[in-house]
Amino acid sequence: MFTYINPLAIQNFLGFKKKKVIAIYEDFELNARRYKEKRFTGLIVEDDAIKTGEKLKNCPHFKGTLQRFEDKLEWHDTNYKKLHTTWYQKINNCKHKGKSFEEFYEHRLMKWDSIFNEIKTKGYKKSEKERDNVEIAINGNGDFLLIDGRHRVAFAQILKLEKIPVVVNIISESLAKSFTDENFAMSFADRNIAKAFAESNPQLTRQLLQKDIKKRLILASKRTSSTENTNN
C-alpha cells in the first residue's frame, strides 16, 4: 500500500522480537518485508504483532546523518567514524573487515551525499520500485513505525519536507477493520492515509476475510508482484 506522510510523524522503529522478525506465529517467523524471500506490502497482522521499537533519534545511523547534513560535519567527525568499525566491518559476514574509512566512504557514504543533494535540488520523488521507498508499519493507533529508510527520513526531516512517499508493509488488523466503516474513513484526519486505504480496500477486505496469516500473505505478495511488474 502506497501513501504520503509527514516525515516528522515517524519517531520510532518497528519493534523486532529478534533480528528482522516482527512476529512469531505458531509455525513460522514473519519478516517485516518478505516471507520465504518473497516480498509483500499491505499485509494485515494481529495488533500485538506490531510493537513500538527504538526511538529514531537514538539510532546511531540517524544521529550520524543529522550530524553530516544538519550540523554540516565531515563524515569522519560523525557517528560514522565509530560505525566504520562497529558496524560496517562486521556486516555481511565481515565481508568488509580491514577496509579503510576511505573505502567505507566510497562504498556507502558517498551515495548518501549524492542522494541528499539530489533531494535538496530536485525534490523528494517516489522511487519506481516499491521496495526502494521508505517502508513503514501502522499500528492500531495509527502511529507510523519505520521498517527501512532511516537516511531518507532524516533527509526529509532536515529539509523540513511536509510529505514524503512511503510504502506501508504492515497494517494492524484493528485499523484495517476500522477503515471498512465508511463513517470512520470519512472522518479520519489524515486524508492521504484515508485515500490509501480506500484505494487498497478490495485487497484489504479479502485479507480480512482470511484468519490464516499465510493466506493473507499470499494476497499481499500477489499485489507486490503485480506492482513490481508494472513498474518494470
Image (cartoon, helix red, strand yellow):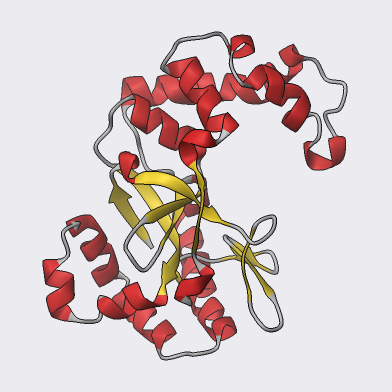
Which residue sits at x=44%, y=23%? 116
- Whether 9 is drawn above or below 109: the answer is below
Residue 172 in sight from this viewpoint? yes
Which residue sits at x=42%, y=68%? 171
Residue 128 in sight from this viewpoint? no
Indicate the position of residue 230 as horizontal and vertical percent values: 44, 60
- From the viewer's side, name the closer residue of 194 and 78: 78
Q: Is 159 on the left or on the right of 91, as rendered?
A: left
- Whether 121 is drawn above or below 20: the answer is above
Indicate the position of residue 120 as horizontal and vertical percent values: 35, 21
- From the viewer's side, name the closer residue of 206 and 69: 69
- Whether 223 is drawn above or below 219: the answer is above
Q: Is 158 on the left or on the right of 132, as rendered?
A: left
The quadrant of the image that shows the N terminus is bottom left
Which residue sits at x=49%, y=65%? 50
Residue 140, located in which quarter of the rendered image? Answer: bottom left
Indicate the position of residue 73 as horizontal and vertical percent values: 51, 9
Q: Is 103 on the left or on the right of 75, as rendered?
A: right
Count how many numbered circles sit on residues in the image: 0
Which residue sits at x=70%, y=21%? 82
Q: Is 206 on the left or on the right of 59, as rendered?
A: left
Residue 26, located in which quarter of the rendered image? Answer: bottom right
Indicate the position of residue 28 as horizontal and vertical percent values: 70, 77
- From the viewer's side, name the closer residue of 152 and 27: 27
